[in-house]
Image (cartoon, grey):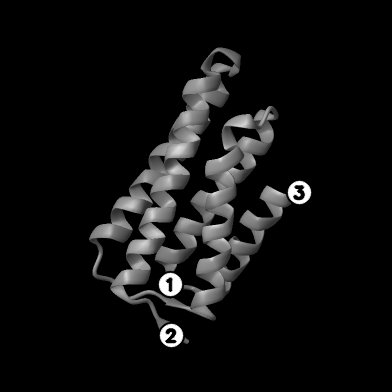
Amino acid sequence: MAKLSSQQLTELGDNFLAFSQSVGNYRMENRSNLTKTQNLEIKNFHRTLLNYADDLYTTSAKLIMDDIQTSLETIKEVTSKTNDTFHKLKKVQKVLDIAASGVTLGAAIFSKNPQAISDAITELSDNWNG
């Protein structure tokens, strides 16, 4: 297992920041169509994702992942898809599922549990593609 470099931590932070911004933008663009509960849930996901981005930028913790490059590429791919098309999603539940998967991934990364990280990346990718 390899350790993440500061550059890789910054890249993860960039991806979580972009992901959080997409979730926040979706909320703002669709606030008139969201229930109060959906609005609050998306707001909480947005805040949590933003906190993960901030923690990745500022933390000096050494994180461990299996196959770092593949994991980073998957995260980067999903983030790119999110940035390109998240606002076009019409099903609120899909938005909630994707945002929740992003939060799960952030928690897994900070748990430093390689299996949890791998499972969270798979879940995020599956929710996006499903």
CA separation in Å, label 1 and label 3: 27 Å
Question: Which circle's residue, 1 or 3, is located before the other in the chain?
Answer: 1
Label 1 secondary element: loop
Please, what is the three-letter code of the amino acid marked with disc 3? Gly
CA separation in Å, label 3 and label 2: 30 Å
Question: Which circle's residue, 3 or 2, is located before the other in the chain?
Answer: 2
In the rendered image, which quarter is residue 64 located in?
A: bottom left
| On screen, residue 13 above or below 27 | below
Residue 126 falls left or right of residue 103: right
Q: Is residue 99 visible?
A: no
Residue 124 marker: none
Q: Please identify the residue farthest to the front as the structure is shown.
A: 84
Q: Is residue 93 visible?
A: yes
Residue placed under numbered mark 2 in the picture: 2
The residue under the point 42% across, 38% down is 21
Please, what is the three-letter code of the amino acid marked with disc 1? Lys
The residue under the point 59% across, 62% down is 121
In the rendered image, which quarter is residue 82 located in?
A: top right
Nearer the camera: disc 1 or disc 3: 3
The residue under the point 66% across, 32% down is 89
Residue placed under numbered mark 3 in the picture: 130
Task: Name the residue nearer the viewer: 99 or 116.
Answer: 99
Badge 3, how many Cα within 10 Å: few under 14, some, many 20+? few
Badge 1, how many Cα within 10 Å: few under 14, some, many 20+? some
Residue 112 marker: 1
